[in-house]
Amino acid sequence: MKLVVIGLGQCGGRIADQFARLNKRARSQRGIEITPGVFAVNTDAADLSGLTAIRSDFRHRILIGGRKTGGHGVGKINEIGAEIAKADSDKVIDAVRSAKRFFEADAFLLVASAGGGTGSGAIPIITQRIKERYGDKPVYDLIILPFEHEESTEERTIYNTALCVKSAGSVADAVILVDNQRYVKKDFSLASNLSRINELIAEPFYDLLCAGEEKKPKYIGAKILDAGDIIQTLTGWTVIGYGKSELPLITLPFTRKSDFRSKSTEIHKGIHAMDEAMSELSLSCNPADADRALYLLSAPAKEMNMDLVKELGDYLRGICPEATIRNGDYPRPRGVLDVTVILSGLGNVEKIREYYSKSVSLIPEFKKREQEIEARLRDLEEIGKDIPTLM
Ligand SMILES: Nc1nc2c(ncn2[C@@H]2O[C@H](COP(=O)(O)OP(=O)(O)OP(=O)(O)O)[C@@H](O)[C@H]2O)c(=O)[nH]1
Ligand SMILES: [Mg+2]
């Protein structure tokens, strides 16, 4: 599957940059292309300069709202991010259209954090504009939810998140939710933590996108997972997970493949990888709420067998009893067995419920603060009304 990736705001831009890196890896390791165009859009010029893999010309790193923000962001007010995106959306559409291989893309993936200003406000607006313009291609939003400490120190973060998620949910074909807090590992420093988190966020997409684009016969699975399967699966609230089991690099001569013990070891490893994928989902949710699910097994061809594929299917069926389940296998040279899982069409997401209910109680507080600020400004004007101006 090929995606046009558009990162909005700082977080979105950096994760899009990570997708550009994945594409370079796919090209050099596998000779295939997974992202025919990667773009970053921001109100902040410095953030755009900090990217490394996205092409550096103005058509790939797109500065919006320049006159309004002076190139310095919107300071976490996502209503302003949305206004700027409305005014400058043509810049994004034109840039995407001019990408040379744009016609090869199967879908769009837009990426942003929900808690900031620019990306949070722009993602629903740009999603809508792209849908109006390219009705035949689905548009998916990958939305990054804030860390817990950000929610507790700044209420605006919760309000931004609720506004962003609700708006994106009403326009995108699917919203893939990623909770930053799930990736916090205490032993990382924050700076390297963010780039490590971004790698972990993008990684599950690698095999998923490569599987259907593979051209070498020996890496083509018995059941290929292609763009059609992914598009049929993605709808509404969605989470993604990834897990792996390390395999020995060489098979010892005395463990014959037909041996029942080695077969059960493979199944054990497969289940272990699936278990890890489910426990490290991008947002914690109840899998029983999924209407659709998908799993991709990647492993050396000789490690995969029908029993393993069936066991993984049974495992998923057990925890997602209502879901339509799609699957595929992707033979890889050697080393690891990994499993990528998508749960989609979730009927309930506890975390979103929390954002909505907390935000409802914040609205009167924000209104009151706004009125207070306006009243103070009126006061100030009143005091200075007799002073002449230079204008
Ligand atoms: N995973 C991840 N989260 C990030 C990254 N950068 C920022 N965030 C999160 O994104 C939120 C802040 O949003 P930003 O993306 O910085 O904001 P923006 O869209 O640039 O908007 P403004 O700067 O307010 O104009 C916070 O919840 C951060 O924790 C990143 O590189 N990776
Ligand atoms: Mg910013």
Image (cartoon, helix red, strand yellow):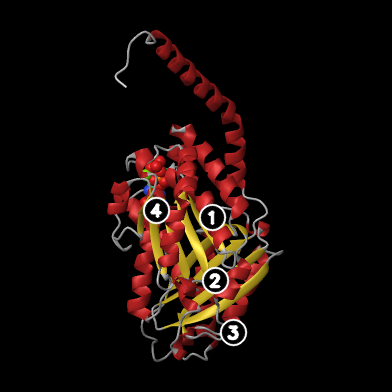
Judge depth for marks 4 and 1 and give the one in front. Answer: 1
Q: Residue 77 is drawn in which quadrant?
A: top left
Instruction: Please tell me which of labels 4 and 2 falls first in the chain.
Output: 4
Q: Find residue 57 and report its horizontal and vertical position in percent.
A: 30, 60
Q: Between marks 1 and 3, how big is the CA–CA gap? A: 44 Å
Residue sticking out furthest to the front? 391
The numbered mark, 3 or 2, whose residue comes first in the sequence reads 2
The quarter of the rendering in which ligand 2 is drawn is top left
Q: Amino acid at mark 2?
A: Ile
Compared to 266, does 123 lie above or below?
above
Q: Earlier in the sequence, mark 4 or mark 1?
A: 4
Distance from the alpha carbon under mark 4 to that under mark 2 = 40 Å
Q: Position of residue 337 (x, y in %)?
A: 46, 76
- Front-most of 20 and 251? 20
Q: Nearer the viewer, mark 4 or mark 2?
A: 4
Placement of the C terminus among the 4 image quadrants: top left
Closer to the N terminus: mark 3 or mark 4?
4
Q: Position of residue 274 (x, y in %)?
A: 53, 68
Q: Nearer the viewer, mark 3 or mark 4?
A: 4
Which mark, residue 129? 1
Residue 115 visible somewhere in the drawing: no
